[in-house]
């Protein structure tokens, strides 16, 4: 990697006693984001490459590739001692094992577009409006409406 790019990268790292915090912009999922020639990269993945030179393919890697996971669970951390390689499956299992996986459902999820109240309204309006009409009214896709109606998301509290 080019020295100018690496220097720019390091200018956005704040080393604390534990985590090395990314001070640059986060992406839409809360991970550090760094652009090189207009392409966006996750900062913790770049740190892995800076430290190790590449991200190795590991056993159980699927079409999503190898994940660079955080042992500290801090999405803005780029401390290489807090990073490890894992499959997507392992990363999700780690999240659930640490009690984070099941807490972000429905309107508690950061990417949620609906509240539980709106999901309840969709259930009530369904007999009179189609999936497509409901989706348009609430700014979601028809598949989301279908999942609500099937009880697969936004389950009643």
Image: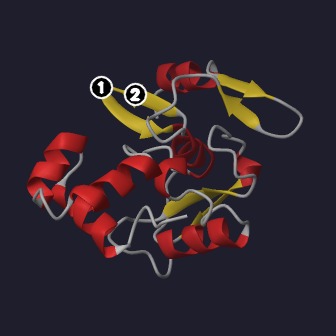
The residue at 54%/40% (across/down) is: 31
Residue 138 falls in image quadrant: top left
Image coords of residue 25 (percent x, y): 51, 24
Looking at the figure, which quarter contains the C terminus?
Answer: bottom right
Near-viewer residue (156 or 112): 156
Image height of 91 relative to 43, above or below: below
Image height of 125 relative to 94, above or below: above
Q: Residues within 10 Å of mark 1 (few under 14, many from 20)?
A: few
The residue at 49%/54% (across/down) is: 54
Residue 120 falls in image quadrant: bottom left
Near-viewer residue (37 or 155): 155
Image height of 40 relative to 72, above or below: above
| Residue 139 seen anywhere in this rendered image of the structure | no
Query: Label 1, on which residue?
Result: 38
Image coords of residue 127 (percent x, y): 16, 65
Query: Label 2, on which residue?
Result: 35
Image coords of residue 151 (percent x, y): 37, 73
The reply to whether callout 1 and callout 2 are in contact (CB within 8 Å) is yes
> What is the number of the mark on residue 68?
none
Q: Secondary structure at mark 1?
A: loop
């Amino acid at each position: 990697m080019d020295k100018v790019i690496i220097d720019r990268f390091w200018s956005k790292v704040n080393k604390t006693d534990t985590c090395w915090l990314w001070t640059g912009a986060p992406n839409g999922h809360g991970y550090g984001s760094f652009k090189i020639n207009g392409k966006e990269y996750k900062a913790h993945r770049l740190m892995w490459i800076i430290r190790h030179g590449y991200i190795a393919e590991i056993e159980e890697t699927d079409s999503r590739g190898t994940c660079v996971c955080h042992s500290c669970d801090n999405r803005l951390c780029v401390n290489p001692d807090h990073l490890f390689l894992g499959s997507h499956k392992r990363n999700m299992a780690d999240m659930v094992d640490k009690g984070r996986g099941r807490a972000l459902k429905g309107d508690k999820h950061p990417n949620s577009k609906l509240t539980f109240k709106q999901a309840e309204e969709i259930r009530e309006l369904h007999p009179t409006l189609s999936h497509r009409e409901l989706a348009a009214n609430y700014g979601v896709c028809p598949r989301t409406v279908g999942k609500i109606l099937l009880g697969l998301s936004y389950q009643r509290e």
